Image (spheres, rainbow, N blue to C red):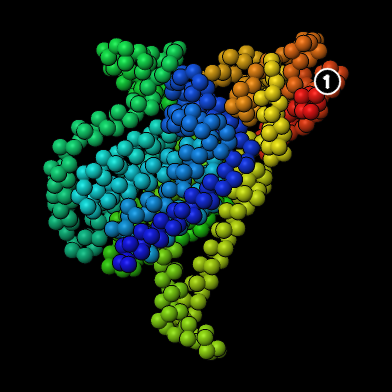
Amino acid sequence: MNRDRRTTLAVGVVTFLALVVRLVELGARVAHQDEARVAYWAYRYMENGVYWYRPVVHGPFITIVDSWVFSLIGASDFSMRLVVALIGGLLPLAALLFRRRLRDSETVALSVVLAAAPLFVYYSRFYRNDLLLAGFMLVAFGCFVRAIDDRRPALVYLGVAFFALAFTTKENAVIYAVTWVGATALLVDRRLLIHRVREADIGPTIADLRGRVRYGVREWWPHAVFLFVEFLAIIVFFYAPRGEAAGAQPTVGDTLADPTLLAGLVREATLGSWTAFVGHWGAGNSGSYLSAAGALWPALQTGALFVLVFAVVGFLLDRYTGERPRDVVAFTFYWGFASALGYPIAVANPFPWEVIHVAVPLVVPAAVGVAAVGRVALQGLRDAGGLDALREGSPTLNRDALAGLLAGLVLVMVAAHTGLAVYDTSFENDQNPDNELVQYAQSSSEMKPLLGELQEVIRTNDGTDVLYYGDNPDFDGDELAGNESADDSPPADLNWFRRLPLSWYFEADGAVSNSTDDAAAFDRLVRGEDRPPIVVAFGETDSCGESYANVADIESSLSGYERHEVQRFSYDSGCTISTMEIYVDENAVN
């Protein structure tokens, strides 16, 4: 078996293991409230066909694709996360796109880093856009690099497709484009500096760069129009309004019936979406830079510390050793470094998933660092007599063998720590507030068995399944009581958000819901003929000790119901309502 095949096989094995880790017990964790709200609207889109871009949900990719998944295999926590898990599990294959620029050992190391970093594993098992955005951008960049190496236009088209898909996932795709421009400028500057040091005249280098640009334009310009149309078609397909989307006309259906509306549809999907994005997220971080950076650092440290360390090692080794620095290593390091500096400014909410965009570009220099340490370990122990010395029980080792032994020990320790961190963050403590990758709106694990019981109750009940009660004067509006038909598509009112993640589970189970904030009306409903088997209400106080309309008002009406208390949040964030009370009719359970 030749080296290329061995490398491909090794990357394939790593990818298979990555898929297994991401798919096992994928539906075991209770839905995070952010997962629940987006999954709910994906399910509603599957049912009613209504969609138009709303920045609060981010890009349309995950909503539209998951609606297809739900229609094929049903709605559940497993199917909700399946697309993200598959893409995250297949991401190690992207390492093969860089094999012309990396050694075989570095290519395999790159696949391992993408497969094993705790940050990537956790958010490959989480229903959000961030891993998709970072993954699509890495693949797009890899396709462009490979297209230059192989001079294959098909790879440019593939790269543009992934680049466009990245823009359908989340708005900060714009940041990637900016960092790419900056990284390219730094590469050009580095080349000019190197030539200035060696030749004292940068004229030939500038002329060479101009020649390369002119050649590239001559070679690729015939494809420019088609590439633009490809990019635009993907953007319009996902961002175009669908169904009876009030205030977002024309829709896809309108345009199919009347093709003269195509220009308006394209304008709404592009300029209309851009205007909505800027209006909602354009301000970026409104707080201090240091507070945002401090909030992001724990997740980066927990989920990708070895990526950061090895990225610095790999970048420095590639820059200062060997024949010449490699562009792909320098470019990805600049890309990641700029992201690390820029994200505390760009993000409106410094939540842990944002650091994915810092770690993903650094995987290339990190792979170079990992492979370099691995080569030292193998070379020292294999070629410098280290293995013979160890086998023969020699009390001394030469310098190369000792370096190899230490390098091997470092790799073993890093591998062990990474494996334990993956198990701890993604499996054992995936809902624990002490886990820095867990954002505060993660509901408690104790809810999962109860949800299975509620599902059975809903499926066997005929009539109203769920009755909500409660309000909180600290917010505008009645927090649980509201119009059940008003939340078919985002955005929703505050009362609906306070029901999360139950809204997702009850919708997927086909529950019929009702609500009230009046204790007398509640009493009539639970004593009437259409007695709801499930009642949901707030606990008695919020995390600041404020009382409000809650279960204390209705306790006397709940005879025959079994009470369950669940945590709405992993930990308090402001004056949140930490607990929710769920009452189940004892006769319905039996």
Label 1 Cα neighbours within 10 Å, binned few <14 / some 14-19 / many ≥20: some
Q: Nearer the viewer, residue 171 or 289?
A: 171
**Image location of residue 520, percent across then percent down:** 80, 10
Q: Quadrant of residue 561?
A: top right
Residue 77 placement (x, y as % from top left): 58, 36
Q: Residue at x 62, y 26 (%)?
A: 509
| Residue 113 vertical position relative to residue 245 in the rendered view, above or below | below
Can residue 588 be spotted in the picture?
Answer: yes
Quadrant location of the C terminus in the rendered image = top right
In the rendered image, the vertical position of residue 194 relative to residue 476, given as above or below: below
Relative placement, left or right, of 536 versus 409 is right
Counting every numbered tag in the picture gives 1
Please state which of residues 249 and 525 is positioned toward the viewer in this rendering: 525
Q: Quadrant of the N terminus?
A: bottom left
Note whether 132 is above or below 318 in the view shown: above
Q: Residue at x 24, y 48 (%)?
A: 147
Q: Give amino acid for label 1.
A: Leu
Which residue sits at x=56%, y=66%? Answer: 413
Q: Nearer the viewer, residue 537 or 184?
A: 537
Residue 411: give x, y in percent of width and height: 51, 67
Residue holding disc 1: 558
| Quadrant of the rendered image containing residue 393 | bottom right
Where disc 1 sits, the SS reads: loop
Q: Position of residue 198 (x, y in %)?
A: 21, 65
Look at the image and tell me whether residue 545 can be seen: no
Q: Residue at x 31, y 62 (%)?
A: 4
In screen coordinates, is 107 left or right of 484?
Answer: left
